[in-house]
Amino acid sequence: MTPTDPSAGGRLAGKVALISGTARGQGWAAALRFAAEGAPHGVRANCITLDHARLTGALGGFMLWNTLPFREGIDTVKVDGGAVTAESGDLFYVTNTESDITVSYGARLVHPEGALVDADKASVVRFAGEHVRLHGDIKASSDSSVTATLEDGAALTGTIPTPRWRSTPAATGP
């Protein structure tokens, strides 16, 4: 079974499916089946958008990782408004992959323990905050990097690894 073009129709054309565990087994089979039925798909990378939604994880928030040597692409997470809660652990844990994370428009992020962003095992993370107040630490292992951009009134309260921290002033207009 191979993915089809969503514009070609099918039972799931125009609908969105969030399937976890697509690296192998049942998750992989489900992703292929949904794609064959016309659901939009991205087998190469994770792409999650929460638009004024609420998401709660008992054991952490988002975990983005790459266990497949052939998988390509950039994992993306967009949180526009709404709330994301990690009852324990890191809110965004990224390991062995490249990720773009954007939090905007007053999104409420709750994580009583753990980091706001934790990049591990050769990860590259681009984290952007727009119109939001963020609380928590940004961590990166020695072989990983996090580029954080705060725009349009965004603010961050927390720690950033100081040996690799660099501040770039915002550009000013004429």
Image (cartoon, rainbow, N blue to C red):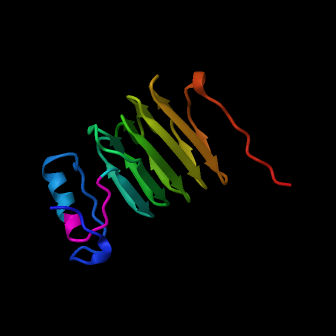
| Residue 87 visible here | no
Left or right: residue 158 versus residue 87 is right
Above-or-below relation of 163 to 17: above
Q: Quadrant of the N terminus?
A: bottom left
Q: What residue is at 67 percent from the left and 52 percent from the top?
A: 153
Above-or-below relation of 153 to 69: below
Q: How many marks?
A: 0
Q: What residue is at 22 percent from the left and 46 percent from the top?
A: 23
Q: Nearer the viewer, residue 68 or 22?
A: 68
Query: Residue 32 sits in which quadrant?
Result: bottom left
Left or right: residue 143 versus residue 45 is right
Q: What residue is at 40 percent from the left and 30 percent from the top?
A: 120
Q: Residue 40 in magenta? A: yes
- x, y (%) of residue 166? 65, 31
Q: What residue is at 41 percent from the left and 35 percent from the top?
A: 113
Taking the view exactly as shown, the residue that stands out farthest to the right is: 174
- Magenta highlight range: 34-43
Left or right: residue 143 versus residue 132 is left
Q: Residue 50 in magenta? A: no
Left or right: residue 78 versus residue 130 is left
- x, y (%) of residue 96? 36, 34
Q: Quadrant of the C terminus?
A: bottom right
Magenta-drawn stretch, dominant element (helix, strand or loop): loop
| Residue 83 visible here | yes
Q: Nearer the viewer, residue 146 or 85?
A: 146
Above-or-below relation of 79 to 5: above
- x, y (%) of residue 36? 20, 67
Q: Nearer the viewer, residue 35 or 142?
A: 35
